[in-house]
Image: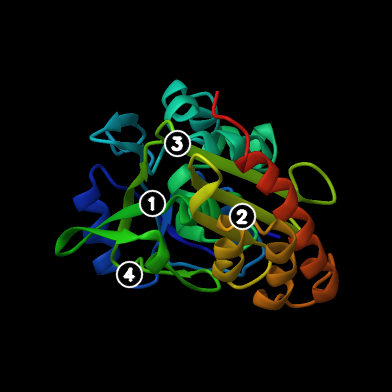
Amino acid sequence: MKPAPFAYARAKTVKDAVALLGKHKDARLLAGGQSLIATLNMRLSAPSLLIDINRIPGLDGIKLSKGFVEIGALARHTQVERSEVVAKHSPLIARAMPHIAHPAIRNRGTFGGSIAFADPAAELPACLLALGGEIEITGPKGKRKVKADAFFKDLFETAIGPRDVLTLVRIPAATKDTRTGFAELARRHGDYAIVGLAATAKATGKGLKDVRLAYFGVGATPIRAKKAEALLAAGKIDEAANAVAKELDPSDDVQATAKVKKHLAGVLLKRVAAQLMEPRS
């Protein structure tokens, strides 16, 4: 299929993009386009205007700043995957990147685009939730920051308004006591996960504290399993795995039944728990 007719504009600055969004209520931003182009071709999306933000300078950087890893919205997945800053200071993101789609898609897809699109089966939204990161959004009234816990609202719905542009993602840099874990189950490597889990914790002398478990593929948004977090922090791994089945409420879909997903969620918890116990290299 071919997309419905649309106009095209190239934004030179973030301010320019915000202004264009204000003038055209059904406009869409074009960054990597790996999700948008597919929805256009299937006519699931039919904007009157595409606003290309790829040429806006300064939105593709990756750096360590004041205890945060800052990743620009236009940083390509492959750029993040190969970043020494990310590998050293954000090991959870480094663990997750190879699982995102396939190399051709990672070459074009953007870090900010994945967060903004907020597919509930995608890896990066769950990672951001597990990390307690924050999203910088620029709109008509300037910049604002939104914590990941408040960012994902519903299915494909986020705190980004109709005249907003996601410009930056900030992730707390890992410290010596940071532990991370990541696992997903998919029919083929690169496919969306049937169930996935991103996790962070702080190591103590005897165990873990500040555990954050963010599941994906089991709801309309990435979901924290808070009861399981508390049990895992107490060293009760089996109890935590059992609690997940009661805490999550997935729906049946073409990949698996809700019952199977709950079982797999418990399996992943045990795998990730083992990763969290590993010393940081």
Pick whichever of labels 2 and 4 is earlier in the sequence.
2
Visible residue check, residue 3:
no
Considering only vertical position in the picture, is 85 above or below 223? above
CB of mark 4 within 8 Å of CB of mark 3? no
Residue 35 placement: quadrant: bottom right
* Outermost residue, left side: 141
- Disc 2 residue type? Ala
Instruction: Give x and y (percent) for residue 153.
Output: 45, 73
Dot 4 corresponds to which residue?
161
Q: Residue 133 carries which label?
A: 1
Pick whichever of labels 1 and 4 is earlier in the sequence.
1
Considering only vertical position in the picture, is 270 above or below 141? above
- Which residue: 14% across, 64% down? 141
173 on left or right of 20: right
Q: Compute the Cα span from label 1 to label 3.
A: 18 Å
Pick whichever of labels 2 and 1 is earlier in the sequence.
2
Give 83 or 65, whichever is nearer the viewer: 65
276 on left or right of 169: right
Dot 3 corresponds to which residue?
177
Mark 4 crowdedness (10 Å alpha carbons): few <14, some 14-19, many ≥20? few
**Which mark is in front, 2 or 1?**
1
- Which residue: 67% across, 48% down? 273
Residue 26 placement: quadrant: bottom left
- Disc 3 residue type? Asp
- Disc 4 residue type? Gly
Give 184 or 179, whichever is nearer the viewer: 179
